[in-house]
Amino acid sequence: MTASTFKSVRRPLRWSGPVRSMGSLAPDIELRNPERVIWIDAKYKAHLELLGRHGWEGLKEEVREQHRADLHQALAYASLADAPLVDTVLIYPQIGDQTQRTTTIASVTSGRRRVRIFLASLPFGYRHPEHRTACLSSFSELYSA
């Protein structure tokens, strides 16, 4: 797959009318080949850990609203790609002493097009070289799915 970074994947929103809102959609990274596009966007919130601990119903309404906005953003990124397989990966920080990466996947299909949203955790730093290798290997497995 070919990688593109933030500046090259920015897509302008062209408004018509007197009121304007956001100027563009800008995921952090795009990975692309002819059949598949993967959008990656880093989130600096504890939402994934909170979901794992408390479930959707156990979250405060403010956190649910923020997370809902993240999911809508992921779906907006998915709309930017014309490939039959589109994945948007929202990467959240791995908090505390958690050793296992958390990943959950939602799928939406429309005709022959499949869109998946991945929620995944990643540590802010690695404890040792083996920890780094294990984390990167698990993400490689994620992308090959």
Image (cartoon, rainbow, N blue to C red):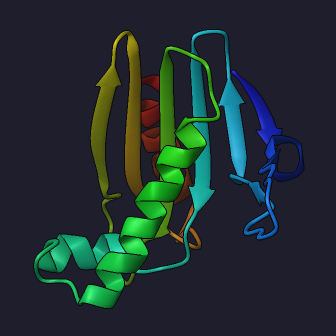
Residue 48 occupies quadrant: bottom left
Which residue is farthest right? 7
112 lies above or below 87 = above
Q: Which quadrant would the N terminus be assigned to in this image? A: top right
Say whether residue 30 is left or right of residue 37.
right
Relative depth, front residue between 121 and 86: 86
Left or right for 5, reference 47: right
Residue 111 screen position, x and y as percent: 34, 12
What x and y, as percent, mark residue 115?
Answer: 41, 30
Out of 55 and 61, give the one closest to the viewer. 61
Question: Quadrant of the rendered structure where residue 78 is?
Answer: top right
Quarter residue 24 falls in:
bottom right
Say if residue 76 shows up in the picture.
Answer: yes
User: Residue 114's spot in the image, x, y percent?
Assistant: 38, 22
Residue at 67 percent across and 15 percent down: it is: 33
- Identified at 60% across, 26% down, the residue is 37
Query: Is the residue 45 above or below the residue 26 in the image?
Result: below
For image coordinates 57% across by 73% down, the residue present is 124
Q: Position of residue 76 (x, y in %)?
A: 55, 47
Query: Is residue 29 rendered to the left or right of residue 119?
Result: right
Q: Residue at x 16, y 72 (%)?
A: 56
> Does any portion of residue 98 appear in the rendered image?
no
Q: Tell me: 6 left or right of 89.
A: right
Tell me the quarter of the image containing the C terminus: top left
Q: How many marks?
A: 0
Residue sticking out furthest to the front: 17
